[in-house]
Image: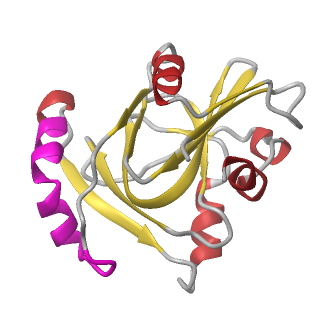
């Protein structure tokens, strides 16, 4: 279930607010410029290729490209048996920013976005059907967990794809991780 947990960074051990209401989640995140929507998904085979996935969502992807100026779209997919899953997880676990919006549409599975606004951290457990667009310059990180199981469509304005500027802050190490929040959301 899609879950938003809000933490005060000075008391990171427990969320002071938790909601699973999509409208409340959307409104709360919108107040920080974050786009959150629930989109219908298509029935695709488990082994669908990047091309099949992008073709299946071509109308939605093209609409986002027109609306937001995105240049490229791709698909990222990880499974628990991926030999480099731990390296991929570590790559996204440190707080960073981007010079463009970070957009993900979850076609399958789940992943945990942390958004850092002032002294608050918003942890959003995204699920299948969730679209999130994190505005450029937003301090954030992503945790896919120790056994990642997700497929996402990503959109970029920069043809190079994912480019991060790491903040050097250790905030990500002080909050409950995927293992704790996935259990609380389930």
Identify which residue is drawn at 38% across, 65% down.
Answer: 76
Identify which residue is drawn at 41% across, 69% down.
Answer: 77
Magenta-colored segment: predominant secondary structure:
helix
123 lies left or right of 68: right
- The answer to whether 104 is drawn above or below residue 81 in the figure is above
Q: How many marks?
A: 0
Residue 41 on image: x %, y %? 28, 54
29 lies left or right of 131: right
- The answer to whether 56 is drawn above or below residue 81 in the figure is above
Please state which of residues 118 and 129 is positioned toward the viewer in this rendering: 129
Q: For residue 52, which quarter of the picture?
A: bottom left
Residue 103 on image: x %, y %? 36, 42
What residue occupies the far top of the structure in this picture? 31
161 lies left or right of 149: left
Q: For residue 167, which quarter of the picture?
A: top right
Q: For residue 15, which quarter of the picture?
A: top right
- The answer to whether 60 is drawn above or below residue 41 in the figure is above
Magenta region? 45-65
- The answer to whether 106 is drawn above or below residue 114 in the figure is below
Residue 65 on image: x %, y %? 16, 39
Identify which residue is drawn at 81% across, 47% down.
Answer: 173
Whether residue 107 appears in magenta in the rendering, the answer is no
Please state which of residues 155 and 146 is positioned toward the viewer in this rendering: 146
């Amino acid at each position: 279930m899609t879950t938003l947990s809000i933490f005060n960074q000075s008391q990171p051990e427990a969320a002071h607010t938790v909601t699973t209401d999509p409208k409340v989640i959307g409104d709360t995140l919108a107040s920080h410029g974050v786009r959150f929507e629930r989109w219908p998904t298509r029935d695709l085979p488990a082994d669908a290729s990047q091309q099949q996935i992008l073709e299946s969502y071509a109308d939605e992807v093209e609409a986002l490209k027109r609306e937001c100026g995105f240049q490229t779209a791709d698909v990222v997919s990880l499974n628990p048996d991926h030999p480099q899953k731990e390296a991929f997880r570590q790559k996204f676990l440190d707080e960073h920013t981007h010079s463009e919006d970070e957009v993900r549409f979850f076609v399958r599975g789940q992943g945990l976005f942390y958004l850092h606004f002032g002294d608050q951290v918003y942890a959003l457990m995204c699920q299948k059907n969730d679209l999130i667009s994190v505005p450029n310059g937003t301090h954030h990180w992503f945790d896919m967990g120790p056994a990642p199981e997700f497929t996402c469509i990503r959109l970029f304005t920069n043809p190079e794809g994912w480019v991060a500027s790491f903040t050097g802050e250790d905030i990500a190490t002080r909050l409950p991780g995927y293992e704790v929040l996935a259990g609380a959301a389930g």
